[in-house]
Amino acid sequence: MLTINIKTVHMQLTPAIRSYAEEKVRMIERFLGPRDADPFVQVELGQTTQHHHSGDIFRAEMNLTTADGALRAVAEKDDLYAAIDAAKDSLVDELQRTKSKKTHLLRKGGRFMKNILRSMGLGEN
């Protein structure tokens, strides 16, 4: 079960923002493997500064902690919901990249062992 902690900076956390952020973060669960026993996501939402004259700039930061390590995604947009979406997409991309890297290393190791066995005359011909 994914644990989510949402924090806001320079703004009020409304129920609509909380539910939207939780809904988007829950989509990350499908990219986690069974080895990720207790994943934890720290979400920080807020306005970057109070002095912008041309409009607000919103920031969404997501830190995912799993058994394999930690991943971080940050997005800044002029719309809070767009920033949440961009941060979620960035985190999903990072998860897929690390999964692909692990699979590649596993296959590379298997290929190496198979070549050793072949050179020793123990493998398939």
Image (cartoon, rainbow, N blue to C red):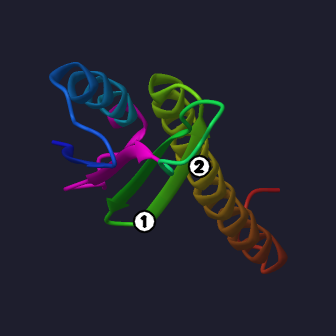
Q: Which of marks 1 and 2 is nearer the N terminus?
A: 1
Q: Which residue is drawn at 21% across and 35% down?
A: 13
Q: In this view, does 66 lie to the left or right of 37?
A: right
Q: Is residue 32 left or right of residue 16?
A: right
- Quarter of image, res 64: bottom left
Tag 1 residue: 70
Q: Which residue is drawn at 36% across and 26% down?
A: 24
Distance (Cα) linking label 1 and label 2: 10 Å
Q: Residue at x 61, y 61 (%)?
A: 106
Tag 2 residue: 94
Q: Which residue is drawn at 23% across and 19% down?
A: 16
- In this view, the residue in front, 76 or 43, is 76
- Looking at the rendered structure, the kind of residue marked 1 is Ala
Residue 36 at what x, y percent from top left? Answer: 30, 54
Bounds of the magenta segment: 29-47
**Local crowd at mark 1 within 10 Å, few (<14), some, or many (≥20)?**
few
Q: What element carries label 1?
A: strand
- Looking at the rendered structure, the kind of residue marked 2 is Glu
As for residue 32 lying within the magenta part, the answer is yes
How many labels sit on residues?
2
Q: Is mark 2 on a helix, strand or loop?
A: helix
